[in-house]
Image (cartoon, coloured by chain):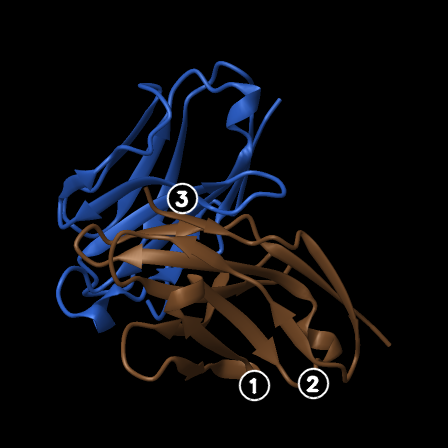
Chain colours: A brown, B blue
Amino acid sequence: AQSVTQPDIHITVSEGASLELRCNYSYGATPYLFWYVQSPGQGLQLLLKYFSGDTLVQGIKGFEAEFKRSQSSFNLRKPSVHWSDAAEYFCAVGHWTGNQFYFGTGTSLTVIP
Amino acid sequence: GAGVSQTPSNKVTEKGKYVELRCDPISGHTALYWYRQSLGQGPEFLIYFQGTGAADDSGLPNDRFFAVRPEGSVSTLKIQRTERGDSAVYLCASSLGQGSGMNTEAFFGQGTRLTVV
């Protein structure tokens, strides 16, 4: 069965510091992988996605993620965090024939000055 | 419209009442999804429409939940005999539908926060 694990429930980083949010998935085939961000009271916004090709994908707001098949991981990174990055981050895996997206439980990011 | 629109944005109802939540997808998107997000959790899949038909309703928790999309555009999620445990944010998303991988990107609405008291 498809599943997504985000092992870190909550992360606190200082503004300007680097960030890595972990995501591990379980999937029977080549996965389509996504990272979404959700600010308080807002809908889910797509940060980036991986379908195929280059395993390092660039997204909006300076985020990037790397697909590592051997580790079943799709970790999200940002070299320098801004206070406005404080939000909830969700990793998701999707299956194109079913068009279903399975989300992780999310990682809450706090940015301190 | 430019994005996925969900109405109402907030709904408070009494236990046992019937509620309807509406989703207006992006024009031209054939696929539509409903998700439920409980406090502190990630969104959980409820149902997926391809056009007018429910292609997968395996996520609906019980027969009190039902969704329709009669004309292949607007969808309504219906909950009968609401229970306090139904309180959550109900998210709707739409996408271009099956096809190439690029078409699986889903765009989400801001959700309807349902509170059952």
At 65% across and 55% down in the image, what residue appears?
A: A8
Q: Is residue B9 visible?
A: yes
Q: Nearer the viewer, residue A30 or B2?
A: A30
Q: Residues within 10 Å of mark 1 (few under 14, many from 20)?
A: few
User: Against B70, is A17 above or below?
Assistant: below
Pointers 1 and 2 within a single chain: yes
Residue corresponding to mark 2: A80
The residue lying toward the viewer, choosing from A110 and B84, is A110
CB within 8 Å, label 3 to label 1: no
* Residue B52 coordinates in the image, percent (x, y): 13, 45
**Are the residues flagged by discs 1 and 2 in contact, CB closer than 8 Å?**
yes
Q: Amino acid at mark 1?
A: Gly
Residue at (41% x, 72% y) in the render = A67
Looking at the rendered structure, whether the residues under marks 2 and 3 are on a common chain is answered as: no
User: Which amino acid, by three-letter code, is at mark 3?
Assistant: Tyr
Tell me: residue B111, above or below residue A52: above
**Residue visible at 16% across and 41% down?**
B55
Alpha carbon distance from label 3 to label 1: 28 Å
Q: Chain of mark 2?
A: A
Q: Could you say which disc has been placed on residue B35 in the image?
A: 3
